[in-house]
Amino acid sequence: MKELYEGMTARDVRLLGEGDFADGHLSVTTVHLACEMACHNILAAQFEADDTSLGIRNDIWFWGEAKPGDLLHAEAMVARVDGSRVVFNVFARAGLHEIARGVHERKLVSKSRFTAALKS
């Protein structure tokens, strides 16, 4: 893994479609996934061949709304690196309006060691 440091940022931008809504409201799952992908995008740029990560904590508060056709922007910033644990501050907006904010944590792992552990 290349070096990670506090303050690194990335985003995930997606066009919201009908499948991103449940009962007429933006799905919490869609918002959480966008925030997780923004975090992953920071890490993926630093990964070497055997690197990956697992989401281990997702504390995202969601209060806003959107509609199909809106762009959902999720942004992440590395808040802390503690060995193999990386903590991110995340927020999401639909168009110009912030609709979610929180903390996401990922654990850095070796793909080969993780896969071997699953087999045993």
Image (cartoon, rainbow, N blue to C red):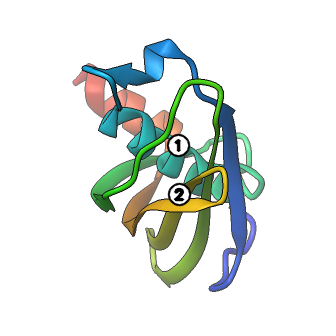
Q: Quadrant of residue 78?
A: bottom right
Q: Quadrant of residue 14?
A: top right
State the image coordinates of residue 33 (x, y, percent, origin top left).
45, 39
**From the viewer's perspective, is 74 left or right of 109?**
right
Q: What residue sits right under mark 2 in the picture?
A: 92
Question: Which element is circle 2 on?
Answer: strand
State the image coordinates of residue 6 (x, y, percent, origin top left).
62, 85
Question: Which element is circle 1 on?
Answer: helix
Count of number-bearing discs: 2
Is the N terminus in the top left, top right, bottom left or bottom right quadrant? bottom right
Q: Amino acid at mark 2?
A: Ala
Q: Residue at image x 52%, y 83%?
A: 79
Give the camera-side residue of 80 and 65: 65
Marked residue nearer the N-terminal end (1 or 2): 1
Q: Residue at image x 65%, y 57%?
A: 43
Q: Residue at image x 50%, y 66%?
A: 90
Give the camera-side residue of 53 and 18: 18
Q: What residue sits right under mark 1 in the picture?
A: 34
**From the viewer's perspective, is 42 left or right of 18?**
right
